[in-house]
């Protein structure tokens, strides 16, 4: 085994806590670590700024579909949100401002990606190789996110397409779509925001729909001057507003996921949205969803259906057979020429690329373990075989109904408490007991089987290759917060700090 001390310019040799990723998760983690007096931590980020998915998704129309007041850190309310649903540039600016005000920017190393992280079982630490050199860490927190690696569709010929092609999460801003023939593949959350923004400027737009989504009206509006003044000057108003939205969602949505009758109003809203937005009866039929509402993410838009109804837009429901030259060829053999192909086909969510780069105690990669056992973690935070590795936005911590920032803050508190406990009890390593992890996941799978996400009969990015929902949290967010409030060392295998070797090596 190589026991030489790794060195690299810009990176220390060793840190107690290494955080990977600087989105909501990594940034929040850094702020909380600093607040709790942790001096020895570093955040590495492959991009050139904080923001994560909000830095990367700059496509036209990118905005959040969770109310702004709820989609903020609880410790950094923002009285300056301009709208009830924030556009991407405001969220990105908010995150940058929070980072700067918290004075943690000096802890970030941008343009630095993880090539490999391997557990050193002898020295009880992670050996991490990055694009900027190597270092070791007692604890690694993976805050790489589940919506960070774009998934390109497996379509014959797409690599040799003669026009321009780019993914929605890697928008090419040098490409002027004015007057061009454009195709958008996919009709998920990204696509339905892009289509209305570009439909008016392109010569022609083809939208390739494989599955018609449920799209309900988006109750978005600009905050009035008075509201913004009140948010800034009335103590507690933002918090009250946030709490009201939060409870509104918690009270309704978890019940609706198990009781289809409660979904009727949303279903009706979706059908009325189609009727109002589209005049053409044939097009109305094409966009009518055929699966239970909620099974895939419910989308919000007032302008998607009217955009599809434009004369210069075609909704293509015939499957894509291949791409040849500068044309998309459908299964019926129709060739549709385009200049620009926008691929809005989502992300690697259940086959996270970072899992291939993490090797645990027994020499197995996280990807291999998850492939064998299914993607799972204890409390979405830790997994057996991988000591001192924590996840933010880990397995089964995603939401279909509320703000991920709330979940992320719960997970951050869990990690902070684990670190506190490790220091207080002189614990060197923590790793969940396999039985505890199994029990946790058995309970999740039992609960989730009853929900629309599994029982609704549709395929979605929530499900893994075996059809198991390994992505969403099936209970209320406050239940998750309660369950992660304290680090439960009794559910962990721990080793005491009894090193016999030179600790600095
Ligand atoms: O990706 P998606 P996304 N040929 O996976 C289709 C968050 N988000 O980037 O349904 C043809 O949802 C696929 O079809 P089907 C949010 O959590 C939030 O839009 O699988 N089509 C689907 O229509 C969201 O859920 C916000 O049959 C193919 C689409 O591509 C998540 O990000 C905004 C195909 C993929 O939809 C991902 O959203 C944006 C193929 N080979 C994103 N492969 C807001 O807050 C896939 N598709 C507003």
Image (cartoon, rainbow, N blue to C red):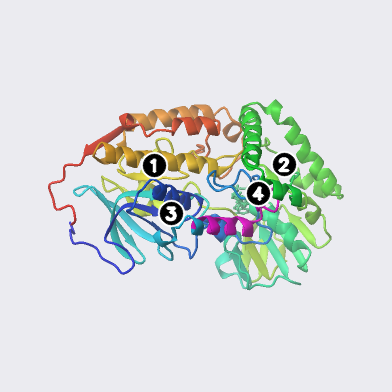
Distance, label 4 to label 2, CA atoms, is 42 Å
Question: Which circle, 4 or 1, is nearer the viewer?
Answer: 4
State if disc 2 and disc 4 touch (CB < 8 Å). no
Distance, label 1 to label 2, CA atoms, is 41 Å
Question: Which circle, 3 or 4, is nearer the viewer?
Answer: 4
The numbered mark at residue 289 is 2
Q: In this view, does 469 lie to the left or right of 4?
A: right
Distance, label 3 to label 2, CA atoms, is 31 Å
Q: Name the residue under label 3.
A: 353
State if disc 1 and disc 4 touch (CB < 8 Å). no
Q: In this view, does 477 lie above or below 43?
A: above
- Residue 331 place in picture, x, y as percent: 67, 56
Magenta segment: does it hold 334? no
Mark 1: secondary structure = helix
Q: Which of marks 3 and 4 is nearer the N terminus?
A: 4
Question: Which circle, 3 or 2, is nearer the viewer?
Answer: 3
Distance, label 4 to label 1, CA atoms, is 32 Å
Mark 4: secondary structure = helix
Label 1: few (<14), some or many (≥20) within 10 Å? many
Task: Count the numbered circles shown.
Answer: 4
Q: Which of marks 3 and 2 is nearer the N terminus?
A: 2
Question: Which circle, 4 or 2, is nearer the viewer?
Answer: 4
Q: Which of 76 and 394 is in front in this view?
A: 76
Majority SS type along the magenta span: helix
Label 4: few (<14), some or many (≥20) within 10 Å? some
Which quadrant is the C terminus positioned in? bottom left
Say which residue appears at 59% left-offset and 59% top-offset.
Answer: 93
């Amino acid at each position: 085994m190589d026991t030489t001390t790794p060195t690299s310019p810009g990176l220390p040799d060793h840190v107690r806590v290494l955080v990977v990723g600087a989105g909501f998760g990594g940034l929040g983690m850094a702020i909380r670590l600093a607040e709790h007096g942790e001096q020895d931590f570093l955040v590495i980020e492959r991009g050139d700024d904080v923001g994560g998915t909000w830095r990367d998704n700059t496509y036209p129309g990118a905005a959040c579909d969770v109310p702004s007041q709820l989609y903020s850190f609880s410790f950094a309310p923002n009285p300056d949100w301009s709208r009830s649903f924030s556009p991407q540039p405001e969220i990105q600016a908010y995150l940058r401002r929070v980072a700067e005000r918290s004075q943690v920017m000096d802890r970030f190393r941008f343009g630095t990606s993880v090539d490999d992280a391997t557990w050193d079982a002898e020295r009880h630490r992670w050996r991490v190789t990055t694009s900027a050199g190597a270092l070791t860490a007692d604890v690694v927190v993976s805050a790489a996110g589940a919506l960070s690696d774009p998934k390109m569709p497996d379509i014959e010929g797409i690599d040799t397409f003669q026009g321009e092609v780019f993914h929605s999460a890697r928008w090419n801003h040098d490409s002027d779509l004015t007057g061009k023939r454009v195709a958008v593949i996919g009709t998920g959350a990204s696509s339905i925001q892009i289509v209305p923004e570009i439909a008016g400027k392109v010569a022609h737009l083809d939208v390739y729909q494989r599955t018609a989504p449920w799209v309900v009206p988006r109750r978005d509006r600009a905050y009035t001057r008075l509201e913004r003044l009140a948010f800034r000057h009335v103590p507690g108003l933002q918090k009250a507003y946030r709490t009201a939205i939060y409870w509104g969602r918690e009270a309704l949505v978890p019940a609706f996921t198990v009781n289809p009758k409660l979904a009727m109003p949303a279903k009706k809203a979706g059908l009325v949205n189609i009727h109002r937005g589209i005049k053409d009866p044939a097009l109305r039929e094409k966009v009518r969803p055929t699966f239970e509402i909620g099974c895939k993410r419910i989308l919000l838009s007032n302008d998607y259906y009217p955009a599809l109804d434009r004369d210069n837009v075609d909704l293509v429901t015939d499957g894509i057979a291949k791409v040849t030259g500068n044309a998309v060829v459908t299964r019926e053999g129709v060739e549709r020429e385009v200049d620009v192909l926008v691929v809005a086909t989502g992300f690697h969510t259940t086959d996270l690329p970072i899992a291939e780069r993490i090797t645990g105690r027994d020499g197995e990669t996280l990807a291999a373990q998850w492939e064998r056992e299914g993607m799972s973690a204890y409390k979405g935070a830790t997994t057996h075989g991988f000591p001192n590795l924590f996840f933010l936005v880990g397995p089964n911590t995603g939401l279909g109904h509320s703000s991920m920032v709330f979940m992320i803050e719960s997970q951050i508190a869990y990690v902070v408490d684990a670190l506190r406990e490790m220091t207080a009890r002189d614990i060197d390593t923590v790793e969940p007991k396999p039985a505890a992890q199994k029990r946790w996941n058995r309970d999740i799978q039992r609960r989730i089987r009853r929900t629309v996400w599994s029982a609704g009969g549709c395929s979605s990015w929530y499900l893994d290759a075996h059809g198991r929902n390994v992505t969403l949290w099936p209970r209320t967010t406050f239940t998750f917060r309660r369950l992660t409030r304290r680090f439960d060392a009794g559910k962990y295998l721990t080793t005491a700090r009894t090193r016999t070797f030179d600790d600095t090596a």
